[in-house]
Amino acid sequence: MKILKYCPNCGKESLQWDGERKWSCQNCGFTLYNNVAGAVAVVIRYNDEIYLTRRNRDPKKGKLDLAGGFVDPKESAEETCKRELFEELQLDVDISNLKYLTSLPNVYQYKEIDYNTIDLFYEYRVPEKFEVNLELSEISEAVWIPLKELNLEDIAFDSQKKFFEEYLKNI
Ligand SMILES: [Zn+2]
């Protein structure tokens, strides 16, 4: 987190990262917090298959990812699920069918900043398989994978790998 050196308040090269959650200016006392960000990840499931997206950008380009993303300001986590699944897959989510499973911490690196996240995992069962219309989507690919064939090495993020280690025990 060395890239932020100059204080956005006084302009001096006196900003210091505390190694965990905030930058402080030794000159004017300004403080900038890098708080934990909320994010959702949704297991879209039909019988014993799940629908995963393939990331088309860094971090972890090319790896498999659960649909989801960061919680926006003033948004509930369930609203995030609904918004993200529509943006990524044009799926019209019925919020009452979202099942909260667990949460796990993760670190999301983006443009040299480490964002600590708390990933909230949901399961969303669909009555039939569907395919995403990629022309309307912000993703490059999505695949149905039988849970038995899921290789954790193909999963993009550590929190999701850890999640699936437990999730796969119960299939
Ligand atoms: Zn300052």
Image (cartoon, rainbow, N blue to C red):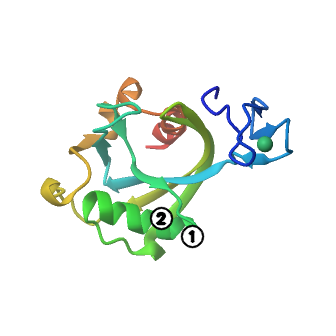
**Alpha-carbon distance for marks 1 and 2?**
6 Å
Judged from the image, the secondary structure of the residue bearing numbered disc 2 is helix
Q: Which amino acid does label 1 sit on?
A: Ser
Amino acid type, mark 2: Thr
Q: Nearer the viewer, residue 111 or 59?
A: 111
Q: In which quarter of the image is the N terminus?
A: top right
Is label 1's Cβ within 8 Å of ligand 1? no
Q: Quadrant location of the C terminus?
A: top left
The residue carrying pointer 2 sits among few (fewer than 14), some (14 to 19) or many (20 or more) residues within 10 Å by Cα, namely: many
User: Which labelled disc corresponds to residue 76?
Assistant: 1
Report the front residue among 46 and 134: 134
Q: Are marks 1 and 2 in contact (CB under 8 Å)?
A: yes
- Residue 32 in picture, x, y percent from top left: 73, 47
Residue 42 visible here: no
Quarter holding ligand 1: top right
Please tell me which residue is depicted at 31% across the width and 62% down the height of the picture: 87
Residue 10: x, y in percent?
Answer: 75, 45
Q: Where is residue 45 in the image (x, y as percent from the top left)?
A: 34, 54
* Residue with the mark numbered 2: 80
Q: In this view, does 133 lie to the left or right of 120?
A: left
**Horizontal and vertical percent position of residue 105:** 63, 41
